[in-house]
Image (spheres, grey):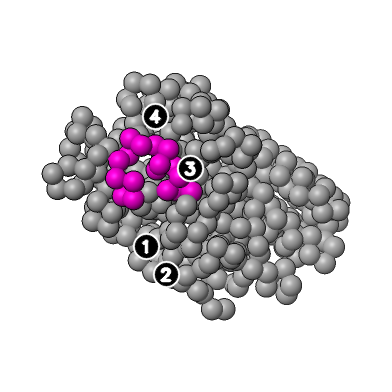
Amino acid sequence: MTLRPTRPRSAKPRALQAVALAAAAALTLSACGGGDTDEATGTADADGVITVKLGVVGPMTGPASLYYKYMEQDLETFGDTFEDKYGVRFEPVEKDDQASPEETARAVSELINEDGVQAILGPPLSGNSLQVADTVQRSQIPWLLAGPNADEIINYDQQPNWAFQTNFTNAQIMNVLGNILWADDAKVGIVFSADGFGQSNLDNLKAWAEDNGFELSAEETIQPGAADANAIVQRFEDAGVDSVFMGITQGADTATVTRAIEQAGYEPSTIMTTGTILTDYKDVAEPSQWENVRIVDPRNFLEGGDKEVLDAVQEATGEAPAIPTNNISTYAMLDIYAQAVQEVGDANDKEAVRQAMEDIETVHIGESLTIDSPYSADDHRLYTDDPADWLTYGFDENFDLVLLGSAEECIESGC
């Protein structure tokens, strides 16, 4: 398969990049831009550098802290990059929302009304973003959504719209997954976490199935930290399920399911999951349990600009990218916003910056990947749902990603 480094509007990206896992020690965002937030006037200083007061909100503490860490890593790693390329320096104003919707609402209100930020990055969790979507829209401030997947966050009936996404959306990935899961009229079962992420996976997959004339043969919930999934696997077998989707928040819970699949000698033809398997799965699973598991993503983790982003994070921080997909999305989002500020020349002219983001001609990811004209007034999404522009990955015995071809090829010939 040929990977193309530049993509026109009609195709949006197929992307390019590597794997990594996460975690440890907090980094200091103040090191990303240097200086005091009082100097973040949003206009050019004597050296021509525009310093932006950037609100950064997410779970700095608690079990979901990886969803803050990827933003932190990118700001530390690439602060100088965007200053050198565009003359834009980011001065972060940090807010810990503890993954709580109520705390997110408080944090966003403070950023807008007390801190006077010129743009907001985050929150990274869809439920928290939904909590503050109307507030940000009414406040008319550029909203940089590098992590959330929920389609409902952006209501395109509200124009001009201030929210921009650089991750794929739930509807986009479900179109790709649905076509793979139901290929050859398979019987499909889903096991999903008993939390917001799992419920969202169930709801979106069921909606796609209904829209396309399919139905789920089995729906099973797994509680966080469950000791085993033997009963779930048995019910899948009893229902004749031969295509399994695991919409599970934690990699450790995914490991519970794949362990039960192996123990039962259950051999579905297809086992798909999400990128959450990259977080904490490897250390509690065995190679024999992941050898048939597949994920899909519009980014290529193994070469090109996406890989350059992840490699740079690893080198600069000494740590693996916290959530590789979202490290890439954050880079793309900061590139879009920095270009818009450079073009306008004043981050305080938020409407002009918003329009410049919407009209962006070329998004840069690393040094070698570009995406042309991804946005329009009714489409603030970076990716499409075309399986030809998505990639399918498996894992080798070391849990390193292996590129298996495009999702379209997976649908046509199997994974």
Q: Splitting the image into 4 quarters, where does residue 413 fall?
A: bottom right
How far apart are the alpha carbons under marks 1 and 4? 28 Å
- Which residues lie in the magenta part? 341-358
Judge whether residue 33 can be spotted in this image: no
Element type at marker 1? Answer: loop
| Residue at (21% x, 47% y) in the render | 49
Q: Between disc 3 and disc 1, whose residue precedes?
A: 3
The answer to whether mark 1 and mark 2 are in CB contact below 8 A is: yes
Q: Is residue 335 above or below residue 7?
A: above
Foreground mark, 3 or 2, reads: 3
Q: Between disc 2 and disc 4, whose residue precedes?
A: 4
| Residue at (68% x, 52% y) in the render | 174
Q: Which mark is residue 145?
A: 3
Residue bearing mark 2: 304
Residue bearing mark 1: 366
How far apart are the alpha carbons under marks 1 and 2? 8 Å
Q: Amino acid at mark 3?
A: Leu
Foreground mark, 1 or 4, reads: 1
Q: Between disc 1 and disc 4, whose residue precedes?
A: 4
Element type at marker 4? Answer: strand
